[in-house]
Structures are given as structure tokens and as C-alpha cells.
């Protein structure tokens, strides 16, 4: 499924932030655009486009940044089957750092026993798990949910799901021209953003499009995933999302 051994980032959430320095030039997105239509039609098209992604695998970099500013950048391999399964493996200089698996039954992580940064990696894994879970769930069926509201705001469509059944309120900003989700916000009962997921650098894969860069921010830190290569709708076996025997289930 993924090369290398390392941590499975099945929704590695939290802690990653990009590095400093000059900001790179924004990549031009060669993806389809659509005529501007009303909210109902645009929402239907976004749901259709999202439904084209049944699975994903890719390789690239993941940057984990804790709330105190400590960060680490790692090579990573990612696999996902929305809306409930994800996995991320990460390594540095050929040495496994962590393996994170997300399934409906929970989240598991493998971190190196001999690592002097074990607790840091474990903490990062907890945050990364939140990212992975949110990433997979939001990518798989969010726009098909009942009760969504959508409003047009210049070049953006603002889609909102109110809090229900213990799930937080979610606001999504969609680019009207390309009908691609650009940012998700999860809000608490006071309307305060507790988690955000930004997606850009979309690329076309057949009839589907997928972001090659994702940044998740929470109180635990920032997680940035930059894919160099990706495959949409590959064949992924159930074993791809089976936690290793050494994996520890996170609370």
C-alpha cells in the first residue's frame, strides 16, 4: 500500500505547521471550472464531485508542529477510504517515526520504543489522528447530509451543518468557480473554531479532483500534508487499514 515503514497517519490531525522562509508561489490549478449557478445546484454538483473519490493513496511530506512551536518534517505515505478509514506512515532518514491507523473502531499508533522523542511523537499522533479522522469524514459524504444550508458570498459558497447528535457545527467554504471545498471549520457550542482544515493545490485525476496540500489546525498544533504523488480510487485491501500488532489504541 505504502512504501517505507513508519507511522500510519490515519487521520493524523493536529500538530503540523509549515516551515518558515519565503512563501512559495501558488501553484496554478488546472482543474475544471463551472458556470455560476444557484446554491442548490452548486451544492448538488459539489456532492457529485466529492462522491467520485472512493479511495486515495499518496506519498509526500508531513509537518507536525506542536502548540509550543516544536516541529518536525517527515516523509509520509497516506491511504484513505472515506468516510471512516485512513492510515499514515511517516519516517525520517529511512527510520520509522510513527504509523497511524484510523477505523470506525478507533485510532491506533505505533511509535518507536527507543526514540527519545516518543512522547512528543505520541502527542503529535493524537493530533494527527484528529486530522485524519476529520479529513476522511469530511471528504466522504459531508455534502450529502440532510439539513445543510448554503449561501453565496462573492466567489465562495458557504455551506453550514448545525450541531446535531453530539457532532459539532461545521462550516465549509467552497470555491464557486471550481466547486472545490477550500476550508472546513468545526465550531463549539459558543461558535468558537476548534479545528480548521484548509485544502488547496487541487489536481485532476480522471473525473475526480483532489487537493495536494492540506493544513489542519487545532489547539494541539498544526499538521500539514503535502503530497508529491497521489492516486485516486486505487484498489486498497482491508489489510491496508488493519493496525499492526504493536499498535497502541489511543483514548
Image (spheres, rainbow, N blue to C red):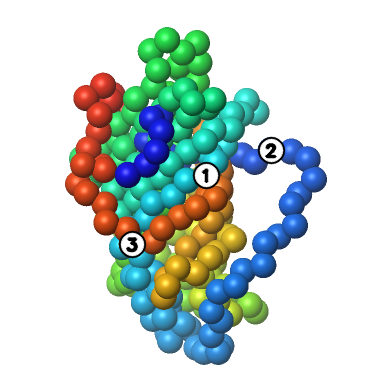
* Neighbours of disc 1 within 10 Å: few (<14), some (14-19), many (20+): some
Position in image of residue 123 (x %, y %): 45, 25
The residue singled out by tag 3 in the image is 233
Mark in front: 2 vs 3? 3
Marked residue nearer the N-terminal end (1 or 2): 2
Task: State if disc 3 and disc 2 touch (CB < 8 Å).
Answer: no
Q: Foreground: 39 or 149?
A: 39
Separation of disc 1 and disc 2 at Cα? Answer: 15 Å
Position in image of residue 92 (x %, y %): 52, 27
The residue singled out by tag 1 in the image is 60
Which of the 4 image quarters holds residue 25? bottom right
Identify the residue at image location x=58%, y=60%: 200
Separation of disc 1 and disc 3 at Cα? Answer: 18 Å
Identify the residue at image location x=26%, y=43%: 240
Position in image of residue 74 (x %, y %): 54, 33
Identify the residue at image location x=52%, y=60%: 211
Q: Foreground: 229 or 172?
A: 229
Marked residue nearer the N-terminal end (1 or 3): 1
Indicate the secondary structure of the residue bearing disc 2. loop
Q: Residue lying furthest right in this view?
A: 22
* Neighbours of disc 2 within 10 Å: few (<14), some (14-19), many (20+): some
Amino acid at each position: 500500500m505504502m512504501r517505507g515503514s513508519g507511522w500510519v497517519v490515519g487521520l493524523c490531525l493536529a500538530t503540523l505547521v509549515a516551515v518558515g522562509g519565503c512563501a512559495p508561489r501558488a501553484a496554478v490549478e488546472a482543474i475544471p471550472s463551472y458556470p455560476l449557478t444557484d446554491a442548490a445546484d452548486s451544492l448538488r454538483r459539489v456532492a457529485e464531485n466529492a462522491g467520485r473519490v472512493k479511495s486515495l493513496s499518496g506519498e509526500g511530506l508531513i509537518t507536525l508542529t506542536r502548540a509550543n512551536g516544536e516541529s518536525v518534517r517527515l516523509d509520509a505515505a497516506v491511504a484513505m477510504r472515506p468516510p471512516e478509514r485512513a492510515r499514515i506512515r511517516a519516517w525520517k532518514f529511512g527510520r520509522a517515526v510513527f504509523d497511524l491507523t484510523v477505523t470506525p473502531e478507533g485510532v491506533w499508533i505505533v511509535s518507536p520504543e527507543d526514540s527519545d522523542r516518543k512522547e512528543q511523537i505520541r502527542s503529535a499522533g493524537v493530533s494527527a489522528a484528529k486530522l485524519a479522522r476529520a479529513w476522511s469524514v469530511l471528504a466522504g459524504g459531508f455534502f450529502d447530509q440532510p439539513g445543510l444550508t448554503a449561501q453565496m458570498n462573492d466567489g465562495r459558497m458557504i455551506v453550514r451543518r448545525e450541531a446535531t447528535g453530539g457532532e459539532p457545527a461545521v462550516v465549509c467554504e467552497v470555491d464557486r468557480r471550481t466547486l472545490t471545498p477550500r476550508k472546513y471549520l468545526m465550531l463549539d457550542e459558543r461558535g468558537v473554531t476548534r479545528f480548521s482544515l484548509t485544502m488547496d493545490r487541487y489536481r485532476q485525476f480522471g473525473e475526480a479532483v483532489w487537493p495536494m496540500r492540506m493544513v489542519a489546525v487545532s489547539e494541539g498544533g498544526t499538521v500539514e500534508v503535502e503530497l508529491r504523488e497521489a492516486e485516486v480510487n486505487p484498489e486498497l485491501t482491508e489489510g491496508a487499514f488493519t493496525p499492526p500488532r504493536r499498535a497502541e489504541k489511543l483514548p
